[in-house]
Amino acid sequence: MSYCKNNPALISHMMFFDPPFRMPAMGNFFENGQDYENMCYHDVAPAVALPAPGTVVLRFFAPDATCVEVAGIGGGMGNTHHVMKRSTEEDGWWEITLHDIPEGFHYHEYFVDGNRCLNPHAPIGYGCFRPINYFEMPGEDSSFYYLNDVPHGDIRMEQYRSPVTGRIKACWVYTPPGYEHAHTESYPVLYLQHGVGENETGWIWQGKVNYIMDNLIAAGQCQEMILVMNDGYAFLPDASEHPARGAIDLVLAKDCIPFIDQKYRTLPDRRTRAVAGLSMGGFQAQAAALHFPELFASAGLFSCYFIIKDHYDDYTELFSDARTFNGLFDLFFFSTGTEESNFYEQNLRTVQHLKELGIDITYFETSGYHDWQVWRHSFRAFVTKLFRPFSSCNSFE
């Protein structure tokens, strides 16, 4: 099934080997006293295969099960439970072929005799507050997030103390290609916030933002920058944080930014610092940018409600003064997927209202649901506009 093996977004994952569909035959190795001559690798059928555009074959190993089902988690795959069939090989595998799957990113889950189970033979991410399976249906414009033959940046896992929360917080840091060797060069920084139910790892494993950055930098389509992907769950000792977004705006301002500026070669100025996020993270990014404009001159909000006034925040005065707002922010970016039924129509009305007020907001939309396909396109569109004007650069709009 070459369509599967030619999909780097599917196989570029920690759960797969390279090549991804080979397994060692270890039985004879141990039975014969660790005889290496009897150890070999053999081809195995993948648990996820894409034999044709829009078609996916899913397989699950459960030799003692009486019923195995698979269901999407909304989005383009829906949430219907599909009953899988036992393999004709009678080898313990169950399988099903699904058609008309739209391009993009698809979380899904398996049920064995009614019990939700993780498929250990398929790609695994973290979503819905648990490890969860996913697959990629590539489209015509997918290579921008593939692992391509270009110079690559580095990813580090960092921990820092947060006096705001009284805890140790975690973040992943991407540095652009050449950072280790350019000892005298400093870089702008983009802080990224994940959505509810996910964590900071999603930007790498599901979002592939490191590959997106590598490819854009190699093509000269965005500025070199450091990415900081933060753990978005931040709770105050007295539990006085915002009930939805928490206190991550305070953590960024008081704890994370000082840590990053001290440890990395950053350009510690508001005009070379930005914050962006998806879903809940977009809500957090808006709060961080509007509560701490002395720290951020650019913000990106992907797939979230745009708050002008609610029970906790009132930005009416700020948005009513377009001249002040536009002078504060170099880039205020807002994006939505066209199939995001909970956001799309309301966000269009909000953008129209802001533009009528004279607010300089950059709006971007792309086809898709509330998932990583929309957020990858949003991220690419945002970073190509960030930290410098790109009059000659693709806008991806």
Image (spheres, grey):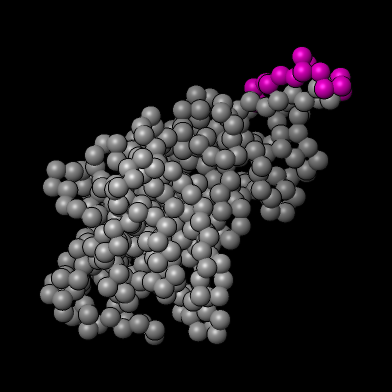
Q: Does the magenta-highlighted stretch encompass residue 34?
A: yes
Which of the two residues, 183 or 356, is positioned nearer the viewer here? 183
Residue at the (56%, 59%) spot, across then down: 128
In front of the other: 335 or 233: 233
Residue 294 image point, x, y percent: 27, 73
- The residue that appears at 26% across and 66% down in the rendered structure is 270
Task: Tell me, yes or no, if residue 239 can be seen here.
Answer: yes
Magenta stretch holds residue 24: no
Residue 60: image quadrant is: top right
Q: Position of residue 8 (x, y in %)?
A: 46, 33
In the displayed structure image, the side of residue 279 where residue 41 appears, left or right:
right
Dividing the picture into quarters, in which one does residue 153 lie?
A: top left
- Looking at the rendering, the stretch of residues picked out in magenta corresponds to 31-44
Say above or below: 328 vs 392. Answer: below
Provide residue 247's location: percent of width, then percent of height: 46, 75
Question: Would you say residue 209 is visible in this rendering?
Answer: no
Does 282 sit above or below residue 315?
Answer: above
Position in image of residue 42 (x %, y %): 67, 21
On the picture, is 36 further left or further right than 52?
A: right
Residue 74 in the image: above or below residue 134: below
Residue drawn at point x = 31 percent, y = 74 percent: 292
- In this rendering, the answer to whether 90 lies above or below 353 is above
Viewer-side residue, 226 vs 45: 226
